[in-house]
Amino acid sequence: MTKKAIILLSGGLDSATVLAMMQDHGYAAHALSFSYGQRHSVELDAASKIAAHAGVAEHKVATIDLRLFGGSALTDDIAVPKDRDEASMAEDIPVTYVPARNTIFLSFALAYSEVVGADTIAIGVTALDYSGYPDCRPEYIRAYETMANLATKAGVTGEMPVNIATPLLDMTKAEIIRAGTDLGVDYSLTISCYDPDASGAACGHCDSCMLRRKGFGDAGVADPTRYQPG
Amino acid sequence: MTKKAIILLSGGLDSATVLAMMQDHGYAAHALSFSYGQRHSVELDAASKIAAHAGVAEHKVATIDLRLFGGSALTDDIAVPKDRDEASMAEDIPVTYVPARNTIFLSFALAYSEVVGADTIAIGVTALDYSGYPDCRPEYIRAYETMANLATKAGVTGEMPVNIATPLLDMTKAEIIRAGTDLGVDYSLTISCYDPDASGAACGHCDSCMLRRKGFGDAGVADPTRYQPG
């Protein structure tokens, strides 16, 4: 029987690469995206296109309302910072931090994994993230995995322990882009920008755009991103 | 400054008691309930009444769709078992098990705790539950707490580690009812039934009704539950 994996698919560059990697490892991919009151719902359109292009077994979109509690630039009215250098980005926890976001996302993935019988949940956290986001660090991921295997029938009985896979953890943005390009990822379908316009064009100046643009440059791969005019 | 606690409030007997206990310990209570596609939305009406009666600082209701994945009698069309003895209930993981439910609920509570600055999340799991539900056992709760303190800004910086409180863990149903009665809990506002009618009247025969009815009997407290006729 084909092994199944749940892939957290945001519509961004990283998770599109994780999806391709897991399929390359022989997994049937069950993609999971979230409609969580994010300002940029163009992400969800991107996720759907990426999932269709990759030929996933299934793509589910869970609706949750993280705005209920507030507390982040991605869901609130705090301004997204622009044109910061990498030192500033690494300095502290970014204002784009969403409280407990990965914990909530992984928890839905855990429910999904139990229902479809998936032995792996894959998430595209990277070393670049975990300088700023506590819930992207390796020690967090391992603690999540330990908890998850005490939380479910399949974990407790030992019938199917779940593995939290983080294939990008030690990769630079350029390495991710090279790996994905080799696996046929169409990065023109992905969107990384924290502040896109309604058409999905990227601002080019938020932290995420800056890292992405540099990544394509460092990888020596033509940047297919559609940027806003001006 | 008054300490704050997030209380997972289901509308049932156990969580209403936890709420009263935390308030008795001097906490300002931030109650959190879920609209999760449960068949018995009368639970949510009960939660609102309990929160109002207790005078909570705030009551939030998060809408999430656990039906997206299916897999449980509480959200699917599997029949709720009736008139089972306690030995049968304890035998295996009940069909009313919702995949990763407490993990999802605690994850929303974690986000909420970070936003309001609460140092405690209280959940009404009991020894009676953890014979059947993996995500009610003490080892699960401790693993969740470890993970939670790696997941958030306040946990990682040590500024405000979060404690998962389970004050009912070693209590019998009768002990819970006695403790809550002493603290002024109005159990007529609570609903435990897995299969209530539209008015909120209890079936009297599901596992939850059987345990509740026996609890009032053992506690020597008059059962205020409104049962369905016949």
Image (spheres, coloured by chain):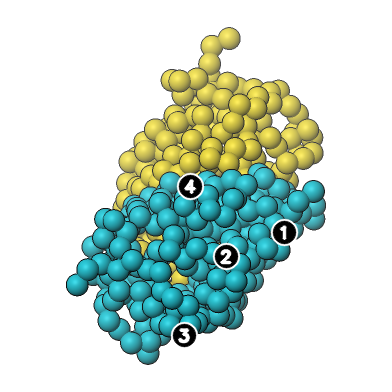
Chain colours: A yellow, B cyan
Residues at marks 3 and 2, CA–CA distance in whole angstroms: 19 Å
Residues at marks 1 and 3, CA–CA distance in whole angstroms: 29 Å
The amino acid at mark 1 is: Gly
Circle on res. B61: 4
- Residue positioned 60% across, 22% down in the render: A204
The residue to which callout 2 is attached is: B184
- Residue positioned 54% across, 37% down in the render: A67
Circle on res. A52: none
Circle on res. B26: 1
Which one is closest to the eye, mark 4 or mark 3?
A: 3
The amino acid at mark 4 is: Val
**Circles 1, 2 touching at the beta carbon (< 8 Å):** no
At mark 4, the secondary structure is strand
At mark 1, the secondary structure is loop
- Mark earlier in primary sequence (4, 1): 1
- Residue positioned 30% across, 74% down in the render: B204
Residue A122 seen by the camera: no
Q: Nearer the viewer, residue B198 or A4?
A: B198
Where residue A155 appears, as percent x and y from the top left, is: 47, 74
The residue to which callout 3 is attached is: B218
- Mark earlier in primary sequence (1, 3): 1
